[in-house]
Amino acid sequence: MQTFTLVPEPLTNAVLITLESLGLVQRLRPSETMVANPTVDMVETIYESSPEFGTHKLIAVRKNVIDIALTFHGAHEEVIFSKPEELSYKPLYLIIANLQVEVFNQKLSDRTLGSQDFHAYEVMYNDPSTMVFTILKDVPHCEVTIPGDGEAPVFYVTEPSNMTMTYVDMPTISLTLG
């Protein structure tokens, strides 16, 4: 089994721009149409869930998991990294693959997945440029923290009410934080 050690990087606006260019996330921002029409009242749908996934829900997620186990979903989800200033959490890391699950699985099958196909980002709570964004459907990802004492981190997710989570089976690869 190959082990790839991921060195966490700060989750910055530049990182989100790169991930967006790869078709993995969508930043929460006005569309080009809105930017081009600064005085026009308008409402635009950012995206709409397929009816098969039902209505949306907002959930709070506490993560005290240290083992990296990638999952993906059949619909988009928004992550919200917000916390009251008086709370102090252990670090939270977003682990994300650079590939949609179909390409990921093909590379896994071909044994061509490499460390360059994965990233670990340290979440910066309450940062206006990175605290809310959409993880697009079929993108392998997960969130983990570090072992030890301290309050496990909490974040929020909006997602379709009936959405399921599918684990990515990686029998020949393990991921660790370094």
Image (spheres, grey):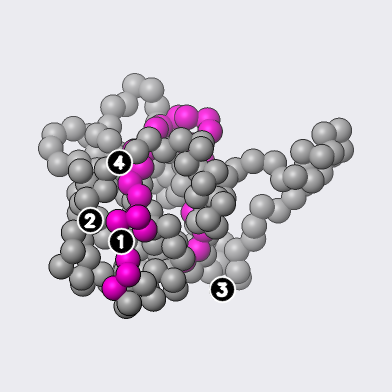
Question: What amino acid type is highlighted by mark number 3?
Answer: Glu
* Left or right of residue 99: residue 8: left
SS category of the residue bearing label 2: strand
First along the sequence among labels 4 and 1:
4
On the image, the x and y values in percent for residue 61 come to: 35, 47
Marks 1/2: CA–CA distance? 8 Å
Marks 2/3: CA–CA distance? 36 Å
* Left or right of residue 80: residue 6: left
**Front disc: 2 or 4:** 2
Which residue is disc 4 drawn over?
8
Marks 4/1: CA–CA distance? 16 Å
On the image, the x and y values in percent for residue 168 come to: 32, 69
Q: Nearer the viewer, residue 2 or 65?
A: 2
First along the sequence among labels 1 and 2:
2
SS category of the residue bearing label 4: loop
Which residue is disc 2 drawn over?
4
Question: What amino acid type is highlighted by mark number 1?
Answer: Gly
Q: Residue furthest left?
A: 148
- Contact between marks 2 and 4 (CB within 8 A): the answer is no
- Contact between marks 1 and 2 (CB within 8 A): the answer is yes
